[in-house]
Structures are given as C-alpha cells and as structure tokens.
Amino acid sequence: MKSLSSSWWFFALLSAFFAALTSIFAKVGMKQLDSDLATAVRTIIILIIAWGIVFFKNKGIGALHTLTPQNWTFLILSGVATGLSWVFYFRALQAGKVSQVAPIDKSSLALTILLSVIFLGEALTWKTAIGALLIIAGTFVLIL
C-alpha cells in the first residue's frame, strides 16, 4: 500500500479537478431546473458510480458486516453533511455566478483546518494557519 499512501496528492489533485468540473457542469445542467431536483439526479449518479467501484474492486455488499457502530454513525453523519452541502451549493449555483459561489464553497478548506484541530487534535502549524488565512482572504477578494 506504500504506492497509494505516497500518492495522496495525486488523488487530491484529481479531486480538485473533478470538483471544478462539477461546478461548471452543474451550472449548465440546472438551467430552468429546480436545484433540489438537480441535486437528487446528481446523487443517483454518484450512488451508481460509488457502488460500481465497490463491486468492481470485488468488495461487494459482503464487506458491510465489517463496519462498526462508530463507522456507521460517522459515515451517516458525513453523508448528511454532504447532502446538505450539495443542496445549499446547488441552490447557490442556481442563483449566483460560479466564479463567486465556488470560492465561498472552497473556503470550507479553512473551516476544515480549524475543525481538524479542534475535533481530531491535528497540529496547527504557522504554515497551515497562514495558508488558511490566505484562503479566507482570497475568498473575500474573489467575491467582492
């Protein structure tokens, strides 16, 4: 697994690339469409892709028994948070410009850093703190 653990940055870059495409595709796809319906359609596609990957990797539903109550609790909470994030993101995209909505959405990075320090006990270095402040400052520059 060393190759996977050392390539986290590659997967993070792919995540950023596809997140950027998400905003553009969603804005175009929601023309004259309710944002909640758009979110629901998107969710079905994600569901199909995620379970397709599980089955393709031969994990299957049989691996569900390995989930602990803590796994279930926090994965459910994560799913609820993701769902609410998408609902509000799509609503904002429908009403606003992608170039303004996306930076505000991505300012969640700074909030994530703060929450990781508070709840996960991760170290807050000067470099990380300055980076978070720059993200917040950059967000304000882009939306004003």
Image (spheres, rainbow, N blue to C red):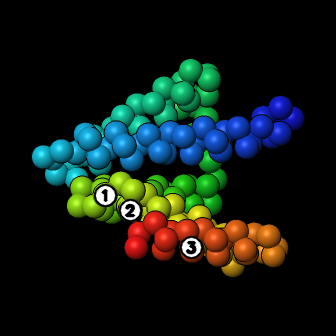
Q: Of callouts 2 and 3, which one flags the residue occurring earlier in the amino acid sequence?
A: 2
Dot 1 surroundings within 10 Å: few (below 14), some, or many (20 or more)? few
Q: Secondary structure at mark 2?
A: helix
Dot 2 surroundings within 10 Å: few (below 14), some, or many (20 or more)? some
Judge by depth and name the residue closer to the eye, 79 or 71. 79
- Mark 1 vs mark 3, CA separation in Å: 19 Å
Q: Is residue 102 above or below residue 39?
A: below
- Mark 1 vs mark 2, CA separation in Å: 5 Å
Q: Which mark is residue 97?
A: 1
Q: Quadrant of residue 17?
A: top right
The quarter of the image holding the C terminus is: bottom left
Residue 123 location (% of width, % of height): 81, 72
At horizontal 25% and vertical 39% (from top left) the residue drawn is: 29
Q: Quadrant of residue 60?
A: top right
Q: Is residue 15 above or below residue 73?
A: above
Q: Amino acid at mark 1?
A: Lys
Q: Amino acid at mark 2?
A: Gln
Judge by depth and name the residue closer to the eye, 66 or 118. 118
Residue 1 location (% of width, % of height): 83, 33
* Residue 83 in view here: no
> Dot 3 corresponds to which residue?
136
Q: Secondary structure at mark 3?
A: helix
Q: Amino acid at mark 3?
A: Ile
Residue 95 location (% of width, % of height): 23, 61
Disc 1 + disc 2, Cβ < 8 Å: yes
Q: Quadrant of residue 117?
A: bottom right
At horizontal 38% and vertical 61% (from top left) the residue drawn is: 101
Residue 135 location (% of width, % of height): 60, 68
> Dot 2 corresponds to which residue?
100
